[in-house]
Image (spheres, rainbow, N blue to C red):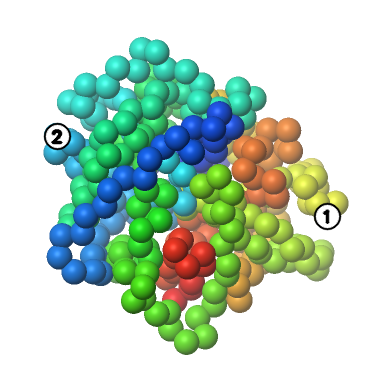
Amino acid sequence: MANVPKGCAIVAATLALAGCDALGMLHAFPEPTIEVRGALPVELPYREGKGGVVILTGRVDDKVTLDFILDTGAPVSLLIDGASTAALGFDTSNARTLGPPDDPASPIGIIQPGLSFTFDRIALSGVSAVVMPERLLACPDRYRSLGFAGVIGADLLRRFVVEVDPAAKRVRLHDPAKWIPPRDAPTAALRFDHGHAFVDTTVTLPSGATLALPMHLDTGMTTALALVAGSDPNLAMPVSGEIVTSCFVGRMREDRLGAPVSVDIGGARFAEVTPRYSPARERPRVQESGAVGSGLLSTRHYAIDYPGKRVVFL
């Protein structure tokens, strides 16, 4: 992770899609056609990026091989227009802000329909993606340090139960009609709003206060836990916490680290989680209380079941 200064965090690019639906674009995006060659489940190896993010390798239009972040924070797919995607011939000269200009998560790009993605035996056709020019990213060096040029989220997650096995570094795609979780596996319900997944959490603060907080579920976020200062009377910005920098597609933001907390999601408990507090006025619009990211989820074996509207810890 050269080029990433101490105290700086990367908020993976798909968090940048949070503002897209403000323009009503998601409803206009057709769902891609998905073909499974052979039987399910399909097992895909993955590379673990900073903060435990899952990075899959796929082909685009059978022209280039790219690394994709698997992201529950991405209601639409994303590609970065740069050196690694040059063969795709994107024209992003007319890139514009695709969402509210005051939202740090609004991407700047174009909408490109008719793409095809292939992940081993899984083929997606008719994909509409947001294409963002690398030159307009607020901190392109940090994005390059993660080594990805694409993001895949709901376009894949809607079709399968997606099991993430950090010990084996494998993603397994299951048939939702046949997948049965282990008996008594901790399970939390997912809610969806404009393509984004949300989960209820219980956060226990160092003071002993226990807060029931709805969280954006964002596996593309390298941070374990993001909390919005002031969203609850007990969530105050730490006075002396270390200042760290988060990178969004259009701007940087200063956050503060807080004292460790514990987090419960559907009976799965995560202890000694260091939260990052952000000012309410600078939060992405999907983060009313905050977000749970791969920095937390990657410590467990889990499955994201969009069809069944649940996340299961295995």
Percent position of residue 204, x then y: 73, 66
Assign a secondary structure to mark 2. Answer: loop
Residue at the disc numbered 2: 63
Establish if 305 lies above or below 112: below
Establish if 91 lies above or below 34: above
* Relative horizontal placement of residue 50, taking residue 46 as reference (left or right): right
Is residue 4 in view?
no
Q: Earlier in the sequence, mark 2 or mark 1?
A: 2
Assign a secondary structure to mark 1. Answer: loop
Mark 2–mark 1 CB contact (< 8 Å): no
Q: Considering depth in this image, is 282 or 266 the residue closer to the camera?
A: 266
- How many marks overall? 2
Disc 1 crowd rating (10 Å Cα; few below 14, some 14-19, many 20+) is: few
Q: Residue lying furthest top in this view?
A: 93
Q: Considering depth in this image, is 7 or 250 the residue closer to the camera?
A: 250
Q: Residue at x 23, y 40 (%)?
A: 116
Q: Quadrant of the C terminus?
A: bottom left
**Labels 2, 1: front one:** 2
The quadrant where residue 32 appears:
top left
